[in-house]
Structure formats: C-alpha cells, structure tokens
Amino acid sequence: MHLISEDRSPARPLLLLMLLFLIVNLFFVGNNICLWDDDEAAYAGFALRMIETGDWVNPQFTWSDVHRKTPFHFWTIAVSYLIFGVNEFAVRFPSALAVLLTALSIYFISGKIWGQKTAAWSSIIFSTSFLSISMGKMSLTDAWLMFFDTLAVLSLLRFLDKPSWKWNLLLWSAVALGIMVKGPPIIILLGGFWLGLAILHPKRKNLIGTHPWIFGPLSLLPFVLWAYFSYMNDGGKLITFLYEWYIVKRVGGAVFGQSGPPGYHFVVAIVAFIPWLPFFLKGFWNALRFARSDEQHISLFLWLLFGWGFYELMSSKLPSYAMGAHPAIAIAAAGILVKYLEADKNKEIAGWAWVLTGIFWILLGLGVWIGFYYTFPDNNSTIGFVAVPMIIGGIALIFVKLEQKVLISAFWGALTLTLLWGVGGQAFDAGSAKSSRKIVASMKMEAGRFTNPKELTAAFCGFSFRQLHMSFPFYTERSFKEIKELSVQEAIAEMNSGKPIIILVGEGAIPHLEYAIKQGSLKSLSYFKPAPEWRSLNDQLKVHPFSIMHNLEGRQ
C-alpha cells in the first residue's frame, strides 16, 4: 500500500490514519488525568459555577479571580458538562474539538490558496505538532483562539482571491467569537494582517469588499452586549480588571514571572515541530526571505509577523501566546516538503538537518526518561514506553531515505503524542506533582469511615501561596456538602464547637495546629495526619506538605 501518491501528495490511507491518530490523541488519550493548575482548574470551576448559579455573565470560582476572561470558553465547558457530566473529559472536550476544527480548516480551506498537496501535508504536520495537540489536552482558551485565528485568516485570503459573501461572513464571525474567547489577540492578528495585505498584496483592492468599517464594529457587538450585562451585574469591576490585567500589565511588563527574551517563541516552535524540523526551518526562512516575491509568501510572512513576531517583542510570554501562527508554520513547512518530494532532493535535505532532527528526538527521549526517573522513580519503567520509540525514531531519521523519513516523522510524531499523553500522562498523574484529586480522595475516604461526605462540611486552612490551586476546591466541593476557608483560630473554634467537620491543612497552619494539639487547645480533635505527598509544579517540584484533621470519631 502506497502512503505517498505518485504526485507526492499524502495518499488517502495516510490521511485517514493521521485523522484517526488525531481523533484518538485529542479525545481518547489521557483525558481523565487530574485537572492542571491553575488555569484549567479555574476554567472548570467557572463553568461549574455558571450552571450552579445561573450567572453566565461574570466568571467566578474560589481563588480564581486573576484567571477571569471573556466567557466563550467557559460557556463551551458548561455545555459540555450538560452533555457529558461534570468530569475531566467534559472539561477538555471543547479544546479538543477546537484543535480538530483547526486541522480540518487547514485541510479544507487552504488548498485553494497554497494547493491541495500543501494543504494535506500542512494538516498532517499540524496534527503531529506537540504544542497543537497539547492545546487540545488542556482546557485553555488558546485552542479556541487558534481556531478562530485560523478561520479568520484563511477566510480573508479566500475572499481576497475570489470575493464572496460566504468568506466575508466566516471572517467576521470568527473575529467576533475570537474576541469573546480572549479579547484583543485576534484583533492584533487580523488588524495587522489586513493592513499588511492592503500594502503588499497584488489583489489588495478586493479588501474593500470586506467592509471593515461596517463589519468591524458589528463584530464587536457580542462583546459589547456581554460587557453591558457584566457592568449591570457588578458595576464594571470585571471589565476594569480585564483591561488592567490583560492589557495594561502585559503590555508594560510580565505577570507571575511569565517572561522571556526575544526568540522565546522560536525555541518553543522548534520543540513543537521536532518531527518536521528540516522543513520548519527552511519554510520559516523562506517566508522571511521571499516575503514580497509572490502572494503565498506575502500571506505567510504577514501571518507569522502578527501571529508570532508581535509576541516575541512582548515581555510577557507563555508558549501558547503565539499559537495563532502555528498553522502558518505548518503550511510553510508543508510547502518545502512538497517541493523536496517532487524534486526528490534526498541529498540536500538528508544532511545536517535530518541528523539534527534525529539527535533532537534521541535527546528528547533520553531527557523524558531521565526526568521521570529522578522525579517519579516509581513510574520510571512506564515512561520507557514513551522514551524508547522517540529514540528509535530519532535513529531511523538519520539513516533511511527521504520518503521513509517523511513517513517516520508522521507516524512517530503521532505515536509519540499518543504515548506521551497516554502512558506518560498517566504516569505523571500517578505521581505527587498532580495529587490534588488524590488528597481530596483521602479526605473523602477518611470521612466516609464515620459519615456520608455529601452531608459534611470540608474546609481549607493555612494554604501557602504555592498551595492555592483551584483543583482543590473543584474536587472538594464535588465530594462534600460545602467548603469554606478558615484561619487557624477559626479552625480551632470549628473543631471545638462539636459540629462535624474535616479540614485540609496547608503548610502555613500545620505548626500552629501541632502546637495547639500539644497545648490541649483542640479538645474535639480525633484525627490529624499527613495527606499524600504533594509537589508544587510551579515551585520546581518542591514538597509543600498538607495534613488532614477532623472531629468525626464516634459519630458512626
């Protein structure tokens, strides 16, 4: 069975296999692991609170104020809850759907612009990029933003080539929904892209037909309506916060230490596109080198400039910020791949670039294995199932012929993602770095010895800054009747009141409560023991201890 057709396009069996890998990776691999702190758990909480309170306007959840955004993503999670129930799969389903829609948009829309062969390979390259799939494995706003960015850019290019009301409707609908996902980023990309096309593109006159002076303001209407209801709800507090936190602070500096030098996103892209590194590097270089040579290169250059270059200049940086440009990277890489396959220039591309790619794969496989061995020694044998294929793939890339290298990149990229999020994700979830669900399960099991946890109040006391993670209240409130936060003195008073309660104690309160026990101040205490070990992911995996205490003994 030929997987690459005679015209050097991916054959139908290869396309179907890659689509199957993509669907499996997005929807069926590792979606039951504990929620990631902080953003994913906060978004899961926002959606749950919307259903519970009926307030679908202003996001709210315990400890989550700094994670509030425009609500489109939270709405999609809430709808997913109504379909699938409140669980991790439902939290991640909307993001997985957004990534799948992005891959399909690249395949079905970009073919008329860059050619169908390039579109097919672009979709495969995008679908085997580590960061693209990761956006579908973590319920973040960036997956939907990437989809609407891609839909808007491709719709604008299709309109530019052949004006049609269909593409104009898709363009401005994507802009409107992109604003409801995350606000300004889609305006930055599309605004800069439109102006760049107006200056450089030979068909620039067609841009007049998009009527941005009419449809631009109309695309803001959903945001304006939401902002109005939000203002009526809280007097403008949320709108003011969003402006100050997401615009003023990020333009003027970084938050939470999320920063990096120029070139940060380039390094992220190298790691994300490791299976296709030779084509990524050449495609990126050509997009810059031939920026004004033809329509295709002009479009790619502007897409990269405003989807990527802009964020290289910002001091605030996270890997997901430049995701709007990753479909452009996939298209640029695919264009080079098609040329090399057609010319069969094996020697030209089988030199240092393929050797470098193979070495990257080998080093990454070894790094994953070694990192897990020292961080989670109980699971180091499991992670070998991920590392070994990466090492084998890296060795193969150095020695086999060009066409085989391409297939290895596709299959090994997809397989590695499957294993990384399946086997590796489960091994990571079993460790102490993601044990909030495990700690809450310990509380529930201990409480269940004496009473029904659903009839019991649970509380938090003395959490340090590193322990204030949204997954704790998310899992706790699903297991107990109610949750609340107590100071040390309030915790002692609650315990001594005789009312049944179980408390998760953070490191800030442990010494004070141990002293109270020693002094006999805690008269009703019946249990005080360490919780399962928990390591802070945002503090270099340092251990920050929890303890569990309650006054339930004798209440059976």
Image: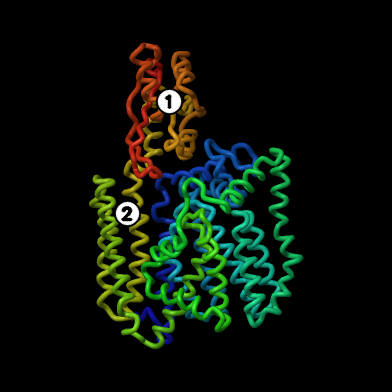
Q: Using residue 345 as the reference point, say whether residue 299 is left or right of it.
A: right
Q: Percent from the top left, x then y, of residue 91?
A: 50, 48
Q: Which amino acid does label 1 sit on?
A: Ile
Q: Residue at x 74, y 60 (%)?
A: 218
| Front residue of 196 and 403 | 196
What's the residue type where badge 2 is placed?
Val
Name the spot of residue 172 as percent of width and height, x first: 68, 65
Q: Residue at x 36, y 28 (%)?
A: 547
Where the C terminus falls, by quadrant?
A: top left
The image shows residue 303, relative to residue 482, as above or below, that is below
Q: Residue at coordinates 50% horizontally, 62% vertically from top-left? A: 312
- Label 1 crowding class (10 Å Cα cut-off): few <14, some 14-19, many 20+? many
Q: Quadrant of residue 214?
A: bottom right
Name the colouring of the figure: rainbow
Q: Visible in this render: residue 24?
A: no
The residue tagged 1 is 503
The residue wearing badge 2 is 423
